[in-house]
Amino acid sequence: MNLIQFLDLDGNRAVGLVDNGQTRRVNDATSVYELAIAALARGIGLGALIAEKGLGDTVDKMALLAEGRMLSPVDHPDPAHLYVTGTGLTHLGSAATRDAMHTANTGAAETGLTDTMKMFRMGLEGGKPATGDKGVQPEWFYKGNGHTVIAPGHPIPSPAFALDAGEEPEIAGIYVIDQNRQPRRLGFALANEFSDHVTERVNYLYLAHSKLRACAFGPELRVGDLPSHIEGTSRIRRDGQVIWEKPFLSGEDNMSHTIANLEYHHFKYDLFRNPGDIHVHMFGTATLSFADGVVTQPNDVFEIEEPQFGAALRNPIRTEADQPVIVGNIY
């Protein structure tokens, strides 16, 4: 079962259920968030609540995407209460590009392992603990809140000061915090953890800056467990032509950490367990067009797809005009 959010022809919000190739509107539902909160209050699952509400008209999800009426598959009524975060160096092979950047900048080839490779090896050795145990903590970063999330099909803005505009095809875990301050998993979605890799390459301590960019996830929320093996495709189109394409792997079979370990080390902080908050946590990738020397341009289109997650996630790039910041006093 997959869920989508969209605007109907009257501009009203709606929720759709995708099952067996057919999409139908969920009766009396305007957001996945409201469904989740109602299900928690009732002590039942999303599927059971939706079954109670029933399904209405058939919806053409591809038309929704083409017409720009598809929304992200989950959002929050107050965007400041949706956190976007992520972990890096979590996938087998994910250290290669990062290590090459940092070796070139630090001379670590002569002096020993980079911090990147040390962190990656820590994950290989301790990222998959026995059930119930706590493993090594991963690299972690803050990306933004609901204001930085771009709907499927809509342009991802790259700030005027950015040095690069690069895709990162990933899987995101989607969570809501219940009234007992515990994270409750809604499901998983395709994600483009859009980043500035040139800024990061200047110095790995600029990683935090490089991640403060917009992002996109969806279009569909896969309700249920994450498949252990995920094999999708990431591509870039320019003027309608594919200029770069590569497979990407995810799922625990292809990772150096378990999902449970990544979840624990995010939600162990009280800050991230406030009732009613939504969390979109991205699990990392080992595939980047930047690693192959691709320099993206405005209007290039990112395309990330994997059949187990439904429709592809597509977003063009838009470069923003310079926005001067003027700090003034109020005293």
Image: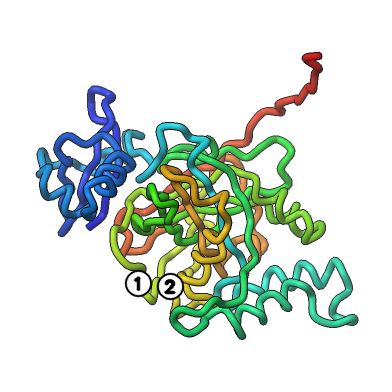
Residue farthest to the top, as pictured: 331
- Give whichever of 322, 170 is nearer the camera: 170
- Up-down relation of residue 269 to residue 225 (above or below): above
Quadrant where the N terminus is found in the figure: bottom left
Q: Amino acid under label 1? A: Pro
Horizontal arrangement in the rendering, residue 15 relative to residue 258 (left or right):
left
Q: Residue at x 62, y 69 (%)?
A: 138
Residue that mark 1 sits on: 227
* Residue 251, numbered circle: 2
Q: Residue at x 43, y 48 (%)?
A: 314
**Contact (CB < 8 A) between labels 1 and 2?**
yes
Quadrant where the C terminus is found in the figure: top right
Residue 101 image-quadrant placement: bottom right
Residue 144 image-quadrant placement: top right
- Mark pair 1, 2: CA separation: 6 Å
Q: What x and y, as percent, mark residue 59?
A: 17, 41
Horizontal arrangement in the rendering, residue 176 relative to residue 117 (left or right):
left
Work out whether mark 1 precedes mark 2 in sequence or the reverse, and give the earlier one.
Answer: 1
Question: Is residue 62 among what the camera can see?
Answer: no
What color scheme is it?
rainbow
Q: What x and y, as percent, mark residue 304?
A: 44, 57
